[in-house]
Image: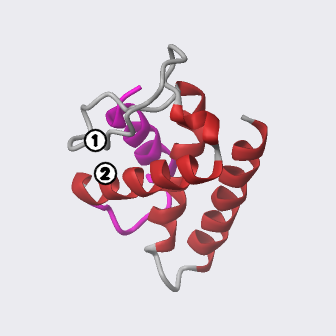
Amino acid sequence: MTGTEIITTVRNITNDTVTYNPADAELLTYLILGMRLVRSLRADSLRDTNGDDSDETEPTALSDTLDMDKRFQGSLTDYVVMRVFQKQGADKKALDRAKEHRQSFFDMIKVV
């Protein structure tokens, strides 16, 4: 799984309502923050897809392979989408969608 895969999905989800279009660098920052949060909440996220211990390397570019099991891809996507919608500020619809994706993130973390 790469950052590009997640960010492509994020852009598809947010494309219909977002007036603020964040740069890739900002989205990469959100992705890294999401990875840190998942790692802090789920000890089993510290293993890669092969079941090997993760070295917790953080990506430096969206094209980097993420050092996290692919089953957390949906959670990371929801986290980044939430952050993008939060940037809309006073837009009530965007804030409501941010809350939905926040809830989905935490629901997935419990279930994954």
Magenta region: which residues? 1-22
Question: Which residue is painted at 62% across and 41% down in the image?
Answer: 43
- Distance between mark 2 and mark 1 Cα atoms: 8 Å
Viewer-proximal residue, 108 or 87? 108
Q: In this rendering, would 57 be left or right of 35? A: left
Element carrying mark 1: loop
In the picture, measured across the screen, residue 37 lies left or right of residue 108, that is left
Identify which amino acid the numbered label 1 is placed on: Pro
Q: Is residue 60 above or below residue 19?
A: above
Residue 31 position within the rendered picture, expressed as x and y whole percent measured from the top left: 40, 50
Q: Residue at x 25, y 52 (%)?
A: 24
Mark closest to the chain's N terminus, 2 or 1: 2
Q: x and y percent of residue 32 in the render? A: 38, 51
Foreground mark, 2 or 1, reads 1
Residue occupying image coordinates x 39% and y 39%: 56
Task: Indicate the quadrant containing the C terminus: top left, top right, bottom left or bottom right.
Answer: top right
Contact (Cβ within 8 Å) of mark 2 with mark 1: yes
Q: Around disc 1, counting alpha carbons within 10 Å, would you say few (fewer than 14), some (14 to 19), or many (20 or more)?
A: some
Picture disc at residue 91:
none
Whole-percent x, y for residue 19 in the image: 39, 68
Label 2 Cα neighbours within 10 Å, binned few <14 / some 14-19 / many ≥20: many
What is the residue that sits farthest to the bottom in this orientation?
Answer: 90
| Residue 23 image offset from top left, x and y in percent | 24, 58
Specify the quadrant of the image occupied by residue 59.
Answer: top left
**Which residue is the site of mark 1?**
59
Instruction: Name the residue nearer the viewer: 90 or 84.
Output: 84
Q: Is 24 covered by the magenta stretch?
A: no
Above or below, 53 relative to 109: above
Q: What kind of residue is marked 2?
A: Leu
